[in-house]
Image (spheres, helix red, strand yellow):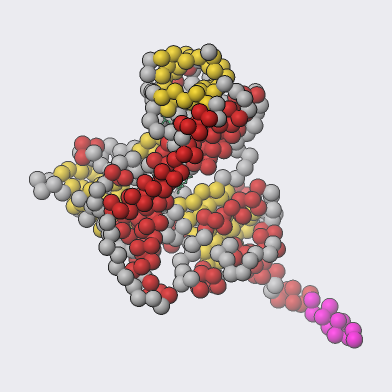
Amino acid sequence: MTYDLLVLGGGTGGLVSAMIAAGAGARVALVERDRTGGDCLWTGCVPSKSLLAAAGLAHAMRHADRVGLPPATPTVDLAAVLDHVRAAQATIAPHDSVERLTAAGVDVLVGEGRFTGPRTLTVDGRPVRFRRAIVATGSRAVVPPVPGLAALAPLTHETVWELRALPARLAVLGAGPIGCELGQALGRLGSRVTLLESGDRPLRGEEPEASALLAEQLREDGIDLRLGVRVTAAARGADGAIRLTLGDAQELVADAVLVAAGRAPRSDGIGLDAAGVRCDAGGAIVVDPTMRTSAAGIFAVGDVVGAPAFTHVAAHHARQAAVNALFGLRRRADRTPLPWVTFTDPEVAHVGLTVAQARERHGERVVVARSTYAGLDRAIAAGEHRGGAILVGDARGRLVGATLVGRGAGESIAELTAWIATGAKLARVSGTVHAYPTYAGAAVRAVDDHLRKRYAGPGLRRALAPVLAARRLVR
Ligand SMILES: Cc1cc2nc3c(=O)[nH]c(=O)nc-3n(C[C@H](O)[C@H](O)[C@H](O)COP(=O)(O)OP(=O)(O)OC[C@H]3O[C@@H](n4cnc5c(N)ncnc54)[C@H](O)[C@@H]3O)c2cc1C
Ligand SMILES: NC(=O)c1ccc[n+]([C@@H]2O[C@H](COP(=O)([O-])OP(=O)(O)OC[C@H]3O[C@@H](n4cnc5c(N)ncnc54)[C@H](O)[C@@H]3O)[C@@H](O)[C@H]2O)c1
């Protein structure tokens, strides 16, 4: 049989592609060599958010006095916390399962897939023919070429879940989303964490204020956050401890190292040359906005096409690619704003342009509205003080970007994403009634303050003075 659509990879990108195609009545095969569900379910979003939930509670217990309760120091048993992680995975797994795919009409082919031509692929050597294909093979952790590091088999987001006990001293390499989320979680659960970042701030792509608030909290948590640091060598001593040599000739001793220094597309070894699919210098499959690769009839989605690497982006790509592949349409994946959230405490949520990007694109006349949780009633009532909102408008005042920091940021960003998608002006955010008191109020407050500063000055008062004087004459 020749399949209408062959999907290589059973993570989010592959699952969504296959389910949509099967729903449309196509003959679909999905090839997966491991467990369906991919990085998100097994080694990414779900376990990290489950771990963060436990870490957040441990932190809240220690700091209960912020709201007038006696603080408590939890005795953390990592094995029990990881039972919670696995229970969350087990609850979600049926949604991504082979059984669900099969029931929907997808043929799940278990094994290693490799293209052998533009319309053929083998699964553990067995040939399969297809009319159209979607590549969704994801990405893998990169271990930087530091002498001695790879030989230590450092932890990555793939293996950290196999720990039996908390490392007493944990060195984390990289303060991107993975390093910050996992570093903060393991630190709050009891490891002494040193977070080593070669750049000058954590979450380097976010607004500098967001990075600064997160850095403050990480340090308050007791994490030794070292910026502008390069690890030049790694070795295990006779005592079993790991010694990292830092660029400035200092030594850091740790019981375990977690590498969180970026990810690389998983595009090698899958026969892309035989299929005529081109990759860029970093190994990302080159696609156009309709997710077509350089090979006619072959599409690619998710992490394998490079940044931004998020589950909801993989799903969004897949929705466009599946219908484009089956029906020859040209639906584009670049027509909608893409939000993302780093689930640290404080959460950092982002959509659209940063202030610097907006200035580059729209010039100096961009509008910037800011607020902090120090003036937000909901945050004050909850004893939260670290957070705020930065909204960016173009020269005409249309919302083009937003960053929210603090509790609730990940939820509130949805509203701003929708406003950007509709081309709304900033004033619409505060013109819309929001329930009181909510964290969503941070964005409203930012816009209100901005409008007040801009319009409610002496000029407006001078202009309105005669109107008010005339109204006083009316009985
Ligand atoms: C620690 C961590 C936390 C994260 N947290 C979040 C979060 O909170 N929110 C968010 O949006 N994103 C998060 N992400 C990112 C998210 O997990 C990825 O963007 C998403 O899983 C990508 O989906 P994908 O389908 O492209 O690839 P994957 O999920 O990696 O799926 C690829 C699949 O292809 C299979 N495969 C590869 N090669 C072959 C082959 N030759 N033959 C057969 N099968 C093959 C693999 O086994 C895998 O199952 C996180 C990532 C990490 C690492
Ligand atoms: N909440 C989420 O949505 C979430 C969570 C985790 C990961 N992710 C996704 O996974 C992607 C990968 O995450 P990541 O954190 O591994 O990568 P990243 O590329 O975002 O960050 C890696 C960090 O490591 C630093 N670094 C690189 N080499 C280093 C070295 N040798 N020494 C010290 N620092 C070094 C970089 O400067 C950078 O700050 C993210 O970009 C995101 O798309 C998403």
Q: Is residue 279 visible?
A: no
Screen quadrant of the C terminus: bottom right
Q: In the displayed image of the protein, which residue is found farthest to the left?
A: 238
373 or 155, which lies in front? 155
82 or 448, which lies in front? 82
Where does residue 248 sit, x and y in percent of width and height?
23, 51
In this rendering, position of residue 101 left or right of residue 159 = right
Q: Residue at x 46, y 31 (%)?
A: 98
Q: Quadrant of ligand 2?
A: top left
Where does residue 238 sit, x and y in percent of width and height?
9, 45
**Which image quadrant for residue 389?**
bottom right
Where does residue 462 sit, x and y in percent of width and height?
76, 77
Q: Residue at x 57, y 66 (%)?
A: 438
Q: Residue at x 38, y 72 (%)?
A: 64
Is the residue 442 above or below the residue 357 in the image? below
Q: Is residue 2 visible?
A: yes
In this rendering, position of residue 245 left or right of residue 173 = left
In this rendering, position of residue 206 left or right of residue 435 = left
- The magenta segment is 464-475
- 248 drawn magenta: no
Report the label total. Answer: 0
285 or 25, which lies in front? 25
**Magenta region, main secondary structure:** helix
Where does residue 153 sit, x and y in percent of width and height?
23, 39
Q: Residue at x 27, y 56 (%)?
A: 77
Is the residue 404 above or below the residue 44 in the image? below
In this rendering, position of residue 441 left or right of residue 244 = right
